[in-house]
Amino acid sequence: MRGHDWINSMLPDELILEIFRNLDSKSSRDACSLVCRRWLTLERFSRDTIRIGASGSPDALVDLLARRFPNVTNVYIDERLSVSLPVDFGRRRNPSHSALSWLRLHFVSERSEPGASESDSYCISDAGLTAVADGFMKLEKLSLIWCSNATSAGLTSVAEKCRFLKSLDLQGCYVGDQGLVAIGKCCRQLEILNLRFCEGLTDTGLVELAFGCGPTLKWLGVAACAKITDVSLEAVGSHCSSLETLSLDSEFVHNKGVLAVAKGCSLLKNLSLQCINVTDEALTAVGVFCLSLESLALYSFQRFTDKSLCAIGKGCKKLKSLMLSDCYFLSDKGLEAVAAGCLELTNLEVNGCHNIGTYGLESIGRSCMRLTELALLYCQKVGDQALSEVGKGCKYLEALHLVDCSIIGDEAIYSIATGCRNLKRLHIRRCYEVGSKGIIAVGDNCKYLTDLSIRFCDRVGDEALVAIGKGCPSLRHLNVSGCHQIGDNGIIAIARGCPQLTYLDVSVLQNLRDMALAEVGEGCPLLKDIVLSHCRQITDVGLAHLVKRCKLLESCHMVYCPGITAAGVATVISTCTNMKKVLIEKAKVSERTQRRAGSVISYLCVDL
């Protein structure tokens, strides 16, 4: 029957609610809520997550959302971000009396105080947190990112009303000990706590929280909290026996605190440390007591030597991920110990450890056959033979990242390509000994490659991309920025052979012309992001051919392209309806284009 609403008449509320819960984007949910009154009501009841950025009246906004969405369990408030208000703000009976207008006027009249700065009106306060507590009593996850006006009073309100809270992120909030004490007393199911950059906290707050939430706490992050010392970590070690993840960045923590955690938290699986006063004594204890450790990240350890890494290799047999950054006193001996003891290792990153060289990586290649991701950054002593061993032994390698490894060349890349045929991601930057030969081997052998980045590799030319275009049909991400020998032929080969390409960076390619851009438009209809900056021979003609076919384009960077004019910019804006960001010089944007897409255009800042 024409005009009959079969969906609403046939489907029960429960089924429609289940459909709403499976929608993967906020825009889809908002669109569904506009269909009819029934769907609006059901969508309100089905929504379990809200995200709020910086807004003109955050406290009143939270209060309104709490009344509209009673079943929310996850609230994310991040005042670093701006966000648009949801469409569900009620029907507008008069354009001059919209719910948003009322909200702003109400907030100004109720909250403004003499002497209050304008910026304060964009920050959620204790009144907003009280609204969260009163409106979302089923709350399980709360994130307050850089909410500078929130204090212990607001956090106490949350603690008293939201007793099912399991996750609390206070990054950048200046809350005091009283709020954390209240969380420890009331929220006995808390599992995750992030205290990064909480400068107002001292040992008192964290000790009390550890005492109250110790049995359930599984994840703890502490960074840049100058008044949190070993005393807090001793409490964590004594009371938080279920702790699985600890991320610690502090100049005020010494061996005593880490020792207490190592001895008391035997279930620890993930440990990240950036503590310049921690030495071998503490890390050796981790190797002895934390036998379930799966992930270890060590940053800037001036006093950390191979002794600790030998203890990790000896005791932590379940280790799967190891990240070493600026650990200057580590050498091949320590890495060899890890290779010998941690046979389940799948991820390894070595960044700026200048005494780790070829021999250490050879040990990894011979022993760690389950390795799937390897990153070598600023490793000047690692040569081709190291990656040759990785190619022979690590058949499951899927990702390789190389940055400023000056003696790694084509032989290494050839070994990886022929030995690791499941390779999906290859990132190489400023490795000047890598040339076309190595990349051709990748094209000939790695048919599953989806992500290729070879930035500022002067010896890579068109013939390399021709091989990639022929052998890697699943390629989605390509970055060849600064590879001066690449020109039209290489990019045309990619356009004709890689139809799934969604990201392309060809910046600083001086030999690239309009013909290549036209081929990209013809062959890569799924392209969403393109970077053309510093391509001096690209003109409006090539740009027009590109955007004519690439209807899904969302971002285009084209600064310092003298052949692109205001007409080309206007063509991009008028043709690409999905465009979200255009980076261009201000002089190339006409007034009409500015009016049409002001929010989409970003300008290169060159004025001093």
Image: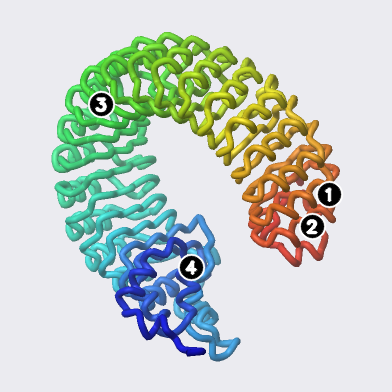
Give the Cα separation between the discs numbered 3 and 1: 62 Å
| Residue closer to the observer: 554 or 101 | 554
- Considering the numbered disc 1 on the image, is that residue within a helix, a strand or a loop? helix
Q: Are the residues flagged by discs 3 and 4 in contact, CB closer than 8 Å?
A: no
Q: Which residue is mark 3?
A: 255
Q: Which residue is mark 2?
A: 571
Q: Are the residues flagged by discs 3 and 1 in contact, CB closer than 8 Å?
A: no
- Considering the numbered disc 4 on the image, is that residue within a helix, a strand or a loop? helix
Task: Identify residue type, mark 4.
Answer: Ser
Q: What percent of the width, then of the height, locates residue 415?
A: 51, 16
Q: Are the residues flagged by discs 1 and 2 in contact, CB closer than 8 Å?
A: yes
Give the Cα separation between the discs numbered 4 and 2: 29 Å
- Considering the numbered disc 3 on the image, is that residue within a helix, a strand or a loop? helix
Give the Cα separation between the discs numbered 3 and 2: 62 Å
Numbered label tally: 4
- Of labels 3 and 4, earlier in sequence is 4
Give the Cα separation between the discs numbered 4 and 1: 36 Å
| Nearer the camera: disc 3 or disc 2 | 2
Mark 1 Cα within 10 Å, few/some/many (few <14, many 20+)?
Answer: many
Q: Looking at the image, can residue 492 be seen?
A: yes
- Of labels 4 and 1, earlier in sequence is 4
- Of labels 1 and 2, earlier in sequence is 1
Would residue 315 appear left or right of 546 to someone viewing this image?
A: left
Q: Which residue is mark 1?
A: 540
Residue at figure coordinates x 85%, y 50% from the top left? 565
Q: What percent of the width, then of the height, locates residue 222?
A: 33, 42
Q: Which residue is mark 4?
A: 28
Residue at figure coordinates x 24%, y 68% from the top left? 161
Residue at figure coordinates x 26%, y 54% from the top left? 180
- Considering the numbered disc 2 on the image, is that residue within a helix, a strand or a loop? helix
